[in-house]
Amino acid sequence: MKTFQDDLKRRLKDEDFKKEYEAIQPEMEIIRALIKARKEQNITQKDLALITGINQADISKLENGNRNPTLNMLKKLADGLGMTLRLEFEPKQKQHA
């Protein structure tokens, strides 16, 4: 039986797929970090909505990858989770020939 990781590894050999997959990773990192922080604190989406004033449906859409957050929304979410939002610009890794 194939696992998700097995299928992903196979699909990443396709350069077009790999390019698209890599392009969405910054958004996926934000989503994973939000869900992880919320769950570690045992906070539901509804609880987070009450704390932040952000509609629960919008939090759900964000966590499902169906909504792009504004910087202001990310600040509110971080504050509601008792965290500091930190964004970084990092140099891209150079490909070796």
Image (spheres, rainbow, N blue to C red):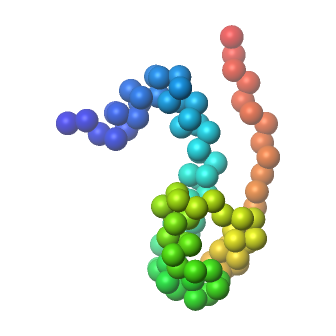
Position above or below: 23 against 69: above
Pick the residue in front: 18 or 85.
18
Position above or below: 79 against 4: below
Position above or below: 38 against 30: below
Q: How many labels does the image show?
A: 0
Q: Residue at x 53, y 59 (%)?
A: 66
Q: Residue at x 56, y 64 (%)?
A: 62
Viewport quadrant of the C terminus:
top right
Residue 63 is situated, as x and y percent measured from the top left of the image, at 51, 64
Snapshot quadrant of residue 58? bottom right
Viewport quadrant of the N terminus:
top left
- Evaluate whether residue 33 shows in this view: no
Residue furthest to the bottom in view is 50
Left or right? Give the position of 91 relative to 18: right
Snapshot quadrant of residue 84? bottom right
Residue 67 is situated, as x and y percent measured from the top left of the image, at 58, 61
Position above or below: 80 against 7: below
- Evaluate whether residue 88 shows in this view: yes
Residue furthest to the left in view is 1
Residue 92 is situated, as x and y percent measured from the top left of the image, at 74, 33
Q: Which residue is drawn at 56% across and 35% down?
A: 20
Q: Residue at x 78, y 51 (%)?
A: 88
Pick the residue in front: 70 or 84.
70
